[in-house]
Amino acid sequence: MSEINIPPRVWKEFFDTFSERHAGWLVQVETHDSQTGETVALQIASLHSIESDLLDEKNPRIDLTVLCESKELKQILFKPSQVTLYISEQDGEDSLRISSLNTETTIRIRGARRVNALDVHKILKVADSVRDEAA
């Protein structure tokens, strides 16, 4: 399994691209609360979007939105510290893990074709280029 840590400076671009490519795909979301030790798993849902909201520097967040039984469910991940993409050697086993204040949230991509690691690296390079041009 390949593990790719996504640097915070490209979260917005990464999540925009990830959401665009995976909107409508089936996912299972698991959240582990490190304070209570409790793990909550959402039944299979359809991914709507993952967005970073980093405008409030003191309270950054990542918004995860899924569609489940005709309802839109939003999970807000406060003060994210790490985003890691796990790419399996087998189809249907990729996942995205987001570490945030007191929680670890894992988004398992169900029945998906493998995420191409080269595509992720291209996203990171494009984001760096755009950032360099803007500076």
Image: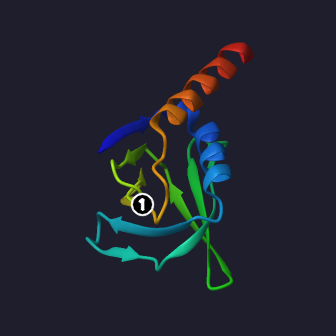
User: What x and y, as percent, mark residue 78?
Assistant: 51, 55
On screen, residue 134 versus residue 93, left or right, reads right
Q: Where is residue 8 in the image (x, y as percent from the top left)?
A: 51, 35
Name the residue at 30% across, 74% down.
38
* In the displayed structure image, the side of residue 131 where residue 7 appears, left or right: left
Residue lying at 66% horizontally and 14% vertically, measured from the top left:
132
Res 100 visible? no
Residue plotted at (64% across, 43% down): 17
> In the picture provided, is 34 more to the left or to the right than 126?
left
The colour scheme used here is rainbow
Viewer-proximal residue among 135 and 106: 106
Q: Residue 9 location in percent, x, y?
A: 55, 30
Q: 22 or 102: nearer the eye?
A: 22
SS class, disc 1: loop
Q: Which residue lies furthest to the left in this view?
A: 37
Query: Quarter of the image containing the N terminus?
Result: top left
Q: Decide if residue 26 is in sight here.
A: yes
> Of residues 6 and 17, which is closer to you in this image?
17
Q: Where is residue 35 in the image (x, y as percent from the top left)?
A: 29, 66
Total residue callouts: 1
Q: Name the residue under label 1.
A: 92
The quadrant in which the C terminus is found is top right
Quarter-of-image position of residue 107: bottom left
Amino acid carrying label 1: it is Gly
Badge 1 crowding class, 10 Å Cα cut-off, few under 14, some 14 to 19, many 20 or more, is some
Q: In this view, does 9 lie above or below 93?
A: above
Q: In the image as oriented, which residue stretches furthest toward the bottom?
A: 69
